[in-house]
Amino acid sequence: MEVIFESCIKVDERGEWFIELKDTRSGRVEVCLNMDEYSQKVEDFGAAYGGEINEVVWSKDENVSPHTMDEIRLEMARLQQEIEPKE
């Protein structure tokens, strides 16, 4: 059985973004308030499956602005740079 996580970008009533992470096999759900927390939670969820994650399906709520998406993309790029080996 495949290990698939769902990541949904949402905005709270104060206009702050967060990511709701769901393990589709166990039904476990966590709220991540930043990309560092999200990265750690994905790692934690994946540990239950020996680190083997088949797919992460992304979505966003309708009220997520383009500016918020840009902010999240920048944070994701920063994390990617941190984990990629430096040449």
Image: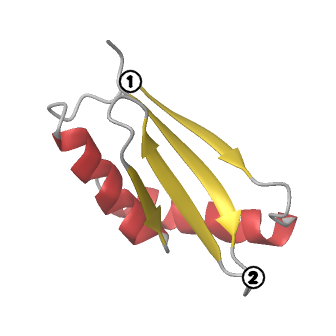
**Placement of 27 over or under 32, stated as above or below:** above
How packed mark 1 is, by other alpha carbons closer than 10 Å (few <14, some 14-19, many 20 or more), is: few
Direction from residue 7 to residue 31 in the image, left or right: left
> What amino acid type should be assigned to the residue bearing mark 2?
Gly
The x, y position of residue 5, in whole percent, is 44, 37
For the residues bearing labels 1 and 2, Cβ distance under 8 angstroms: no
Tell me the tag on residue 15: 2
Direction from residue 39 to residue 78 in the image, left or right: right
**Placement of 35 over or under 44, stated as above or below:** below
Alpha carbon distance from label 1 to label 2: 32 Å
Q: Secondary structure at mark 2?
A: loop
Q: Quadrant of residue 69?
A: bottom right
The x, y position of residue 24, in whole percent, is 43, 32
Direction from residue 61 to residue 86 in the image, left or right: left
> What amino acid type should be assigned to the residue bearing mark 1?
Asn
Q: Residue furthest front?
A: 27
- In this rendering, the label closer to the viewer, 1 or 2: 2
The x, y position of residue 9, in whole percent, is 65, 57
Q: Earlier in the sequence, mark 1 or mark 2?
A: 2
The residue sitting at 23% across, 52% down in the picture is 44
Q: Quadrant of the N terminus?
A: top left
Q: Which residue is nearer to you in this view: 29 or 71?
A: 29
The residue sitting at 30% across, 61% down in the picture is 40
**Placement of 22 over or under 34, stated as above or below:** above
Q: Residue furthest bottom?
A: 14
How packed mark 2 is, by other alpha carbons closer than 10 Å (few <14, some 14-19, many 20 or more), is: few
The residue sitting at 49% across, 74% down in the picture is 33
Label 1: which residue? 54
